[in-house]
Image: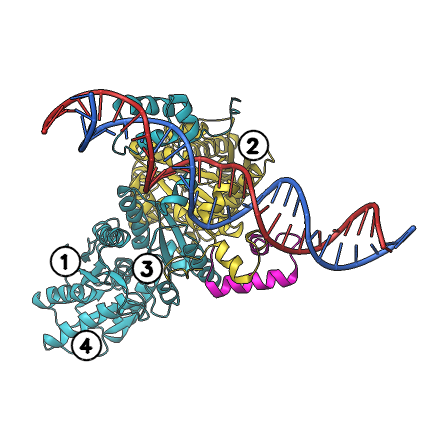
Chain colours: A yellow, B cyan, C red, D blue
DNA sequence: TCAGGTTCTGGGAGCGCTCCCAGACGGTTG
DNA sequence: CAACCGTCTGGGAGCGCTCCCAGAACCTGA
């Protein structure tokens, strides 16, 4: 028998030969199947260690029809991804949660139109067992394209305008906004403005709706108290300036994200307003590296990306195991973390 | 011949049968090999379209021994990744550059010790054709572990204390620091402090060395003018406060990252120092969403993560094609972008 | 002692693809 | 008309693995 050259990877056959058993027994030992004698298992494991064996994944997934990889698709313009701490947290959480169930994360950024076709082709190609999608923009064509996929898909947050027929794990955006505004109302505030997120996104729309309904329920008039911004720091600062300009007597503001709240805070202090005495500020996200670190620390609606991703992974695993066949919409609850800004 | 059930993916064989040619011809047509008649190619492509065929990657890579996937490993404590805009830019650049050469990015976060073994096992398992590694910390055990891999590896930035035997693409950190400090010296500054990065990282060490050497060359005394911080905003703010405390008459500061410079700026303005009149500030990174957006906009040493990643991908592709066998250390030049802070 | 289990093992088939090789086909040449 | 070339095609082997199945080995209890 010719010795294998140094750089060639040992195969299962090599391990079996080295251990003096058959390929089948070696396979069983390595995948700890039933019905392998302790003696054989021992020998096989030793042989594998000795030869530095690691199984060829391509061969394995050719027969098992599982790749052990899950795609995480982020559909968002390039610029937004760079300074959005929430997205970074999502990537990280995705990695951890998938690792916990023994899956590898394949990150996909889908932005331009060419990205879309490339993404679909990739997902179609059997590289991954399932897909987690974050596509917050309503006009995004990606979610529709993904519906036709032969691979299970779970959406994080509202999936464009697909309301049914898909698996979704979302946060209670409207409920969160209600919590925030109720908190301000019961603290005696009466001129409660809002800096809303871009209205092409479901989450932004829901947060704005929550703010509006709560005001109306409390007998307050929401007219003229809305300014829309783009979830960035600079956008938040500009929106706050414009609000102060239009409504100088406002005494509170509900900001649809921590990042925008940082900008708003900056504008407010330049304008000489003290927080929370003159103006109370409540934001959304409760990002760990942002909200508690501000001066003053921000009261914020708490949503944990890990929880969302965990629920998404769980749903996906059920899907892969053939359970949970009907599409479901899970709405995760949020809570209010009260700090000094309100 | 039994009809294939709806949900089963068509194979190459199915496409061939549908097109009325052999499996070989179908394969040739789809991979546009030589020696296929226009007629056959046409029929095969039509059949593939009709059946919604996409090749099984596992089967393909089993025989070609290529997966078309490249791992990007980020070895960094969790907290750091979340608010480090440079890392986010690297991920993004990695995705783009790899997509351009037809490869898929598999992102790997390697932080804890369990991560290390899992990472090594994964990379060993033949899931990917090559690896790009960012492991800035000198004490990090990962780079050593990766040396033994049978997969080509290219490091981004100094690879722990492995000085030779590995492929590295780094920036000229020391040269960048020299540029920054020379700029300050020639503007007539004479008490030039620095906020250095963590000294367990090669890049930080080199930037500090560049600062020190340039001061000495200019006949200035670096003693007592160094404060070390952790590349975070808060860390930069604290370091600046401590510098002001110890050296009240400083007239310039070289900060080893944009993020820390933002913190330093905050401290300086709280202390009533005007920038650049009282204190000139020069930082490092020239992050597009940070440096130009500050008040005042930051003078910063410009380094483009895309360039670094592009060079890394190029090296890796050469490695995969069997060219460029000897390890090389590429040092990319940096430049100084002058803005209002100096 | 032998039937009837249970535990363990090895061989064979086959996953879907690419690549090699033999051969068919058609159009030039001598 | 035979010899030859370049173009095109189909069959077969094989990548490294898992799974199925037949059978060996070992244990019971009657």
Residue ID for mark 1: B336
Which residue, given by chain and number where applicable, does mark 4 sit on?
Answer: B222
The residue that appears at 28% across and 72% down in the rendered structure is B227
In this rendering, the answer to whether A166 lies above or below B136 is: above
Q: Rounded to the nearest whole Å, what is the CA distance between mark 3 and mark 1? A: 22 Å
- A33 is within the stretch colored magenta: yes
Number of marks = 4
Magenta residues span A26-54
Q: Residue shown at 49%/62% (left/top)?
A: B114
For the residues carrying marks 2 and 3, which lies nearer the camera in this image? 2
Residue A328, numbered circle: 2
Q: How many angstroms separate mark 3 from mark 4 (CA)?
A: 24 Å
Cα separation, mark 1 vs mark 2, equals 54 Å
Front disc: 1 or 2: 2
Mark 3 and mark 1 in contact? Answer it, CB < 8 Å: no
In the rendering, which numbered label is found on residue B233? 3
Q: CA distance from mark 4 to mark 1?
A: 22 Å
Task: Read off the chain for label 1.
Answer: B
Element under disc 2: loop
């Amino acid at each position: 028998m010719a010795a294998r050259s140094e750089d060639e990877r040992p195969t299962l056959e090599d391990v079996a030969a080295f251990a003096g058993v058959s390929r089948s027994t070696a396979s069983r030992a390595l995948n700890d199947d039933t019905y392998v004698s302790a003696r054989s298992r021992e020998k096989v494991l030793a042989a594998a260690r000795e030869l530095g064996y690691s199984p060829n994944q391509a061969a394995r997934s050719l027969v098992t029809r599982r790749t052990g990889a899950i795609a995480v698709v982020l559909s968002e313009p390039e610029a937004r991804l760079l300074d959005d701490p929430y997205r970074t947290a999502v990537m990280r959480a995705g990695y951890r949660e998938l690792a916990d169930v023994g899956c590898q994360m394949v990150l996909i950024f889908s932005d331009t139109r060419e990205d879309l076709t490339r993404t679909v082709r990739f997902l179609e190609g059997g590289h991954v067992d399932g897909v987690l999608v974050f596509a917050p923009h309503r006009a995004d064509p990606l979610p529709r394209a993904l519906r036709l996929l032969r691979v299970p898909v779970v959406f994080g947050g509202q999936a464009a305008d697909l309301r049914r027929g898909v698996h979704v794990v979302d946060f209670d955006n409207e409920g969160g906004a209600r919590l925030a505004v109720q908190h301000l109302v019961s603290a005696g505030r009466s001129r409660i403005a809002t800096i809303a997120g871009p209205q092409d996104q479901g989450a932004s729309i829901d947060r704005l709706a929550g703010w509006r309904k709560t005001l109306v329920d409390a007998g307050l008039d929401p007219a003229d108290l809305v300014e829309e911004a783009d979830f960035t720091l600079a956008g938040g600062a500009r929106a706050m300036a414009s609000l102060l300009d239009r409504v100088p007597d406002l005494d509170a503001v509900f900001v649809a994200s921590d990042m925008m709240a940082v900008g708003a805070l900056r504008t407010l202090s330049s304008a000489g307003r003290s927080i929370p005495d003159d103006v109370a500020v409540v934001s959304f996200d409760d990002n760990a590296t942002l909200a508690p670190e501000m001066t003053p620390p921000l009261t914020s609606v708490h949503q944990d990306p890990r929880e969302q991703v965990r629920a998404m992974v769980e749903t996906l695993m059920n899907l892969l195991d053939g359970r949970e066949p009907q599409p479901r919409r899970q709405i995760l609850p949020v809570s209010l973390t009260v700090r000094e800004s309100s």
